[in-house]
Amino acid sequence: MAGSPLSSRYCPAPLIPVSLRLQELQLRRRNGPLTGERRGRYSRTPYIAVIATEVLLVVALPKTDLRIWGVTVGVVAITALVLGRQLVAFTDNDRLLTSLDRSLADLHEQKEWFRSLVQHASDVTLVVGPGDIISYASPAAARIFGGDEPVGLQLATYVHPDDLLLFQELTAILAATPGTDAAAQVRLLHADATYRWLDLVGADLTGNPSVRGVVFNARDVTEARELQDQLRHEATHDSLTGLANRALLAEHLAAAGTTQVSVLVADLDGFKQINDAHGHHTGDELLIAVAHRLRTGLGSTGLAVRLGGDEFALLLPGAGPQEASNLAADISLALLAPIEIDGTPALRIGASIGIATGPANNPDRLLREADAAMYRVKHDRAAI
């Protein structure tokens, strides 16, 4: 049978599995891994080889052998079914892969969009993990911290000592209410040893497996805070002497509540004569010198205030009448010392000081009583 015509007619049959194998290899080569871009849909070239093989098989078969034709029809039918199912599968796969490619492209575009936002955002994003350790800092952190990035360090070590309690309260609130926002304004240390004012808005996302930490968004408000502090200082302090004004005195009295305080009201003796004789410049310099002596004599125990003109006040929280009287005597003695002002002889000036003691929740009464006591002292001196 080796040399029979029937055997030679079946020779094209092995081309069928070969063509299918070629199709598989070509699909693998063309599509490659999902990370690369697919270069096209499935190839139809191997199917031409399958069809050619079937045609050759039919042509090569004897025309009179019905059994061979039955087998041939079965082979062709099965091959057609297999190829048809394969084409359907390839079409479905191609549609799925196209959808996957589109989804991956959208995901990549979204990732790049978010990355660009973070890279160029002026606000700082920090992720703080267990132990208060910074696990992520956006590029804008370099402007806030300076030097090396703070990743791996404790955020609390950057907080100003005066703001540390407020920062701890903020983190406690965040821990108690996961997923909700809380905010505070604190100062963080810069590499140049200065502090930056920051608006911190945080949310505890420790339970989120993609984050596992507290997320802080921080905005540098140093310039705005400095301007705010400057405006407040100007609103609560005398522009000439730098002492507190009536507004700040009222704030301190209100904050003291029912606590006992002593108020001293001092009016300079002979200031008008000096101002008229030597001019307003000398008068201003004299007021500045008096303010300095009041501030020095008072120390850090109270508040020195310029009420207006040549009238001053001293607020002593918690002080009784005797302590206030002792301070009044010291202040009077300090003011009697000569005051050196450029271009004028040494000047001497005294002060009439009145004292009132009582609860701070009635500031108007305290000031009236101290003012009345001051005028009594001035009247008594004039009568001598």
Image (spheres, helix red, strand yellow):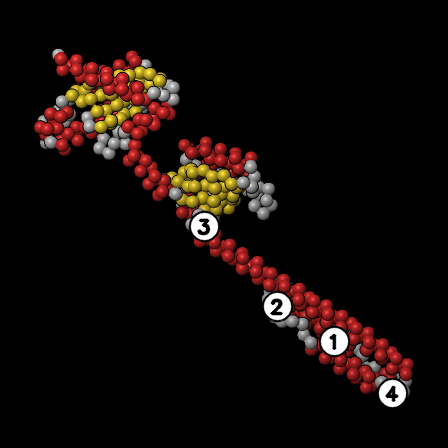
Q: Quadrant of the N terminus?
A: bottom right
Q: Which residue in the protein does label 4 denote?
A: 63
Disc 1 marks a residue whose amino acid type is: Ser
Q: Residues within 10 Å of mark 3 (few under 14, many from 20)?
A: some
Describe residue 211's horizontal placement relative to residue 72 as left or right.
left
Q: Earlier in the sequence, mark 2 or mark 3?
A: 2
Q: Count residues near mark 2 (Cα–Cα under 10 Å), then give few for <14, some for 14-19, many for 20+.
A: some
- The Cα–Cα distance between marks 2 and 4, rounded to whole angstroms, is 47 Å
For residue 97, side relative to residue 227 (left or right): right
Q: Residue shown at 31%/16% (left/top)?
A: 357
Instruction: Determine contact: label 2, label 1, CB under 8 Å.
Output: no
Residue 274 is situated, as x and y percent measured from the top left of the image, at: 11, 26
The image shows residue 3 at horizontal and vertical percentages of 87, 86
The image quarter in which residue 304 lies: top left
User: How far apart are labels 1 and 3 at the CA level?
Assistant: 56 Å
Q: Residue at x 78, y 75 (%)?
A: 80
Frontmost of labels 4 and 1 is 4
- Tell me the residue that label 3 is attached to: 139
Q: Earlier in the sequence, mark 3 or mark 4?
A: 4
Q: Amino acid at mark 4?
A: Lys
Q: Residue at x 30, y 25 (%)?
A: 303
- The local crowd at label 4, few if under 14, some if 14 to 19, many if 20 or more residues have their Cα within 10 Å, is few
Which residue corresponds to mark 2? 38
| Quadrant of the image occupied by residue 359 | top left
- For disc 1, the neighbor class at 10 Å (few under 14, some 14 to 19, many from 20) is some
Q: Which residue is mark 1?
A: 19
Question: Which one is closest to the eye, mark 2 or mark 1?
Answer: 2
Q: Work out whether 208 lies above or below 363.
A: below
Counting residues from the start of the chain, the first of labels 4 and 1 encountered is 1
Of the numbered discs 2 and 1, the one sitting upstream in the chain is: 1
Q: Is 94 left or right of 59, judged from the image as shown?
A: left
